[in-house]
Image (cartoon, rainbow, N blue to C red):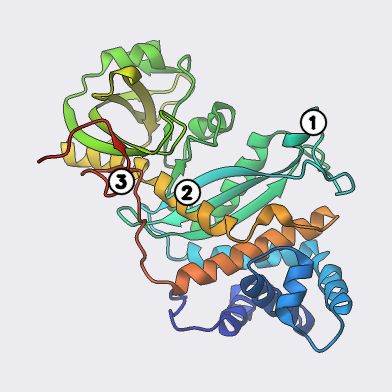
Amino acid sequence: MDRIKRNISLSEFAEVLCSDSLGTQLGKVECKFVNSMLHGVSRSRSVNLTEIAKGLNEKVSLHATHKRLSRNLDDPELTANLSARLLKLQAMRINAETRIIVHRYELNKKFARKIEFLSKSDDLLTAGFKVCEILASEVGSQTYLPLLVHVWSNQVPGFVSDSNEILKAVRQVLAATGNKGMLYFDDHSITQEVLAPFMADQHINYIMLVPDDNVEVCFHKENCSMKEMLSRVETRYAKILYKLVPEGFVGASKIDLDLYMHVGSIRVKLPTSFRSLSFIALKTKSSYSYLGEDATALLTTKTDLRSRKALMGLIDSFLSIQDIVEMHRTLRDSFNPGNFRVLTYNRLQLLMTLLESVIHYELAIGGDELVSDRMFSPKPHDGQFERTYLLPG
């Protein structure tokens, strides 16, 4: 199927999403419900059922609309069907180089008590649900579309670990794409525990920042830690980048930080695998001496990194996923997902899938909008904020 036309209405998008060509046939009641929810979420900019019901403005009492929506939300089969359909809409357009961005965040409900399977924690601030979102973006593009959203908590029956939940979500996406695409893991939200099973996989393609210095790779038949490898790799390619740092991270205000970046790569293998990988050493230093020099280790299944263009291009592609994640976070948070008021896990799962469907629609018809403030830029960022360098003139 071709990409959704930009002039398509939300009702027409609902028809496409519910069409027989995308999955197991849906009944008239299910299709009408999906159409209602997409309009209600879009109009109200909310996932709160009361606000959604108000947005629909039906010729019945608000209570009746709320009750109907709540009843129809409790449908795990519809969740699975709709999730697969949304994934299929974009999966057929993914190629070997498409960035499949894996990101995680939390829906915290610190004052909730009655929600089914709410995670248990001594710290009430962290009680809630965890969410894995998987986004698709082409290399060099500042646009994206959501592929899948997966919700869980440590109280859901069958729960093993957070890493297992993310692994299941990624495998669902790769099954739909025919194993096409390259996994990019958001290093701000994905831990070493989550990365481990992907590192060991013989078939998927990925690039990941490895946060654990003690992880070992095999180099010239010798096992070396990430920390040791960083000192062995010659970082022969260099460039200057400017990083836009939010207020509070370095100083009291937003700062444009100049970075002198040096990069090099070398072939390695994992001790448990015969697959060739590239170890990338990324070293950065700023004129802002307080930060000192930083060395970062990355692993990737890409091994054709012998030229400056290939290696720097991959690093630029990896660094720019933060722009995509931030753009998605801003759009997602405009619906205030933490304000959901459903009491069952099934309803929450379908609600989040419907939200992802609305986001997919708005992005698909919205055009190729660029991120206004890219985190990493080859030239100084525009704006009034502190800088760690002097502007010309």
**Residue 183 in the image, given as x and y percentages of width and height:** 45, 44
Q: Is residue 251 left or right of residue 153?
A: left
Q: Which residue is mark 3?
A: 384
* Residue 197, picture quadrant: top right
Residues under labels 2 and 3: Cα distance? 24 Å
Residues under labels 2 and 1: Cα distance? 27 Å
Sequence-earlier tag: 1 or 3:
1
Count of all numbered marks drawn on residues in the image: 3
Which residue of the protein is positioned furthest toward the left in this rendering?
Answer: 393
Q: Is residue 375 left or right of residue 351?
A: left
Q: Which residue is mark 2?
A: 325
Mark 3, secondary structure of its residue: loop
Q: Which residue is mark 1?
A: 121
Q: Nearer the viewer, residue 365 or 169?
A: 365
Q: Is residue 33 above or below residue 160?
A: below
Residues under labels 1 and 3: Cα distance? 42 Å
